[in-house]
Amino acid sequence: MRLARKVAVSLVVLLGAALIPASFAAKVQTFTGTVSDAMCGAKHMMPGDDAACLRACVKKGSQYALVVGEKVYTLDTSDKATLDTLDKLAAAKATVKGEADGDTIKVASVTAAK
């Protein structure tokens, strides 16, 4: 009886330890909004084409951003394919999946919004 109890307690401790990291893992969320850049946010400063302004700002070092309603999220990625997709979707609606941390989204994927 004592051995069975020790085994049961050990299993509970092991299961608890295994589940703790999962509970602290950040959740991947889905955000849909307009692709922009962190410098301009929701309102582009250069007259004319918003996509051209966005691309010019990114070339000067600004990061891509996603405008969701009134909120502007900076998009954190260094993946070449993701950056290419963001460039193609400049000033267009996109769906971004990633982990949000305040005003920054660590990007897992980007697709055109449906």
Image: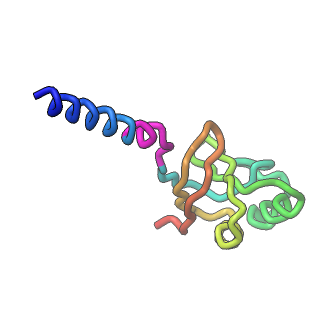
Residue 77's x, y, as percent? 68, 58
Furthest toward the right, the residue is: 60
The residue lying toward the viewer, choosing from 68 and 105, is: 105
The percent coordinates of residue 56 (x first, y second) are 85, 63
Q: Residue at x 80, y 48 (%)?
A: 39
Q: Main secondary structure of the magenta part?
A: helix
Residue placed at 86% from the left, 64% from the top? 59
- Magenta-highlighted residues: 19-27
In the image shown, does 10 or 20 lie closer to the viewer?
10
Left or right, 38 with reference to 34: right
Residue at far top of view: 2
Does residue 54 belong to the magenta stretch? no
Tell me which residue sits at (39%, 36%) in the image.
Answer: 17
Between residues 86 and 106, which one lies in front from this camera angle? 106
**Quadrant of image for the N terminus:** top left
Residue 13 lies, with reference to residue 41, above or below; the image says: above
Name the residue at 54% across, 67% down. 111
Relative side of 12 to 110, left or right: left
Check the image and report above or below for 17 versus 105. Answer: above
Is the image coloured rainbow, by chain, by secondary structure, or in one colour?
A: rainbow
Q: Of 108 and 45, which appears nearest the observer? A: 108
Q: How many numbered marks appear?
A: 0
On the image, the x and y values in percent for residue 107 come to 60, 56
Hey, which quadrant is residue 58 in on the image? bottom right
Residue 101 in percent (x, y) is at 60, 40
Residue 20 magenta: yes
In the rendered structure, the answer to whether residue 50 lies left or right of residue 11 reads: right
The answer to whether residue 10 is above or below residue 40 is above
